């Protein structure tokens, strides 16, 4: 009989796990809590050869994944290039990756509106229970339900998300809504600028209409990291309606005065191209930055993968690649049958690499929170930031 896996979470990690195990002959089912097709999270995704290889393995899709920026540059206050680093890179979008992975899974194996609330296991099987009363038995349960996972406690009770004490303001703007003058820079480069205690980065990503990769039809994706200590985060996440949000806020609930302050700060502190970009954004988003480390990724027949196991800060640009590697390595270790010993070997291989990635994210982002009392803030050299942000693991000097 074929081995079977129940996958909780129908986003990147879940889809990679489903495609990887299916290719080894497993029966899989994906259970996604959201009742409608997922869309548009974390618009821009930096890619590397290792991710392109795994996407190809998953989809047989050999098309280029997105837009290319050949050079990384920094800008001075007048908008002139004052530093550069040669690192040609392809930027894709969450939506595009999701759509090509989702096509690999038949609708009868992808259940929407299935909120998993409980897991049990014994010597013969693992059982997932859903809020809608469903119950699913299989050889293996894969928890792929993101950083906020409660189910993670079935594998590691000690792992909890940690707030980094800064937020990323984010947005995307269609190229056609930006002046030609600003587009000369914004369309051609991965740009990073370092205001004091902050960072703003932007790069072109696919557009939404026909010819999404054609210059002029694409979008510019930006993220601006600013320190917000825990005690001020609450205030930032107080919605228009008066509702207090905890670790994220729906975009349409962000108060107008908060957005006006952001635009004013952009006007005062950013190069002119970035002022235009930020102010042209119809609906900026706020992303409080959290990360997460686990000590364990498996307990018997239950494993965690992707952001549910380890979440790195976005500076490493590694979340999707890591999720894909968790999934494909799992399928390589297990092959075409269920074996507990092999799960331990898989866990061992993934823990070390994932810890390295999360630690690197902390190192790259450590100047973005407010310095502690008696601590001097030391801003990094922009050249190092251009060289270290969102690069392939194989280009990192201390990665083995
Ligand atoms: C600002 C920002 C920029 C980023 N940039 C990059 C980048 O350049 N490159 C990169 O590789 N990564 C990047 N990332 C990270 C990347 O987006 C994530 O690592 C990746 O999407 C994680 O995928 P996942 O499937 O593990 O989790 P998620 O995408 O969080 O998916 C979890 C899924 O599980 C579902 N779910 C939750 N609970 C349940 C339940 N009980 N039952 C059933 N379903 C459930 C959720 O609805 C969700 O669909 C970035 C992230 C941020 C915040």
Image (spheres, rainbow, N blue to C red):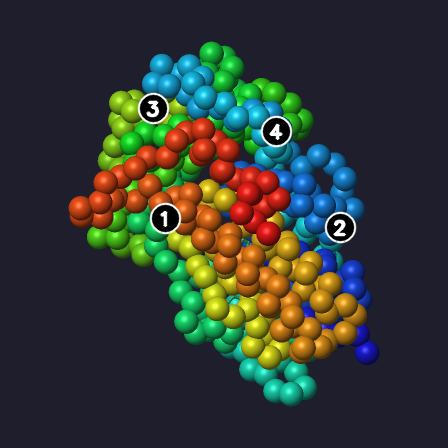
Q: Secondary structure at mark 4?
A: strand
Please report whichever mark, 1 or 2, sits nearer to the chain's N-terminal start.
Answer: 2
Q: Which residue is mark 1?
A: 288
Q: CA distance from mark 1 to mark 2?
A: 33 Å
Give the SS element for disc 2.
Answer: helix
Residue 276 at least partly seen: no
What's the distance in space between the residues labelled 3 and 1, CA to CA?
21 Å
Q: What distance separates the C-alpha of mark 4 from that of mark 2?
A: 23 Å
Looking at the image, residue 261 sits to the left or right of residue 122; the answer is: left
Dot 1 falls on a residue whose secondary structure is strand
Q: Which residue is mark 4?
A: 88
Quarter of the image for residue 324 reads bottom right
Q: Is mark 4 within 8 Å of ligand 1?
A: no
x 48%, y 68%: residue? 295
Q: Residue at x 51, y 63 (%)?
A: 309
Q: Which residue is mark 3?
A: 270
Which residue is drawn at the image coordinates 61% and 21% (left, top)? Answer: 215
- Quote the CA–CA distance across marks 1 and 4: 29 Å
């Amino acid at each position: 009989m074929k081995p079977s896996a129940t996958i909780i979470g129908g986003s990147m990690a879940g889809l990679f796990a489903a495609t990887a195990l299916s290719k080894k002959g497993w029966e899989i089912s994906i259970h996604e809590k959201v009742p409608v097709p997922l869309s548009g999270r974390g618009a821009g995704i930096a890619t590397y050869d290792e991710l392109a290889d795994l996407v190809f393995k998953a989809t047989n899709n050999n098309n280029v994944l997105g837009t290319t920026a050949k050079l990384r540059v920094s800008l001075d206050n007048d908008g002139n290039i004052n530093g550069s680093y040669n690192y040609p890179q392809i930027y894709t979008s969450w939506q595009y990756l999701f759509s090509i992975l989702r096509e690999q899974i038949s609708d009868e194996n992808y259940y929407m509106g299935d909120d998993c609330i409980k897991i049990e296991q014994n010597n013969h099987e693992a059982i997932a229970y859903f809020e809608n009363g469903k119950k699913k038995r299989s050889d293996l349960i894969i928890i792929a339900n993101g950083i906020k996972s409660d189910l993670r406690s079935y594998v590691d009770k000690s792992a909890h998300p940690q707030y980094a004490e800064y937020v990323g303001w984010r947005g995307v703007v269609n190229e056609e809504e930006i002046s030609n003058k600003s587009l000369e820079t914004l369309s051609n480069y991965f740009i990073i600028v370092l205001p004091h205690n902050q960072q703003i980065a932007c790069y072109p990503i696919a557009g939404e209409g026909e010819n999404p990769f054609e210059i002029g039809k694409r979008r510019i994706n930006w993220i601006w990291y600013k320190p917000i200590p825990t005690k001020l985060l609450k205030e930032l996440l107080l919605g228009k309606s008066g509702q207090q949000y905890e670790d994220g806020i729906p975009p349409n609930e962000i108060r107008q005065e908060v957005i006006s302050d952001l635009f004013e700060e952009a006007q005062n502190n950013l190069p002119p191209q970035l002022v235009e970009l930020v102010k042209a954004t119809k609906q900026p988003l706020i992303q409080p930055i959290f990360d997460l480390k686990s000590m364990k990724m498996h307990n018997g027949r239950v494993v965690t993968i992707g952001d549910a196991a380890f979440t790195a800060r976005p500076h490493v640009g590694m979340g999707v690649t890591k999720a894909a590697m968790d999934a494909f390595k799992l399928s390589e270790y297990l092959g075409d049958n269920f074996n507990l010993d092999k799960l331990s070997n898989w866990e061992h291989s993934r823990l070390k690499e994932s810890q390295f990635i999360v630690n690197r994210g902390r190192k790259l982002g450590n100047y973005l929170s407010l310095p502690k009392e008696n601590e001097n803030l030391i801003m990094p050299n922009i050249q190092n930031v251009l060289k270290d942000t969102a690069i392939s693991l194989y280009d990192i000097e201390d990665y083995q």
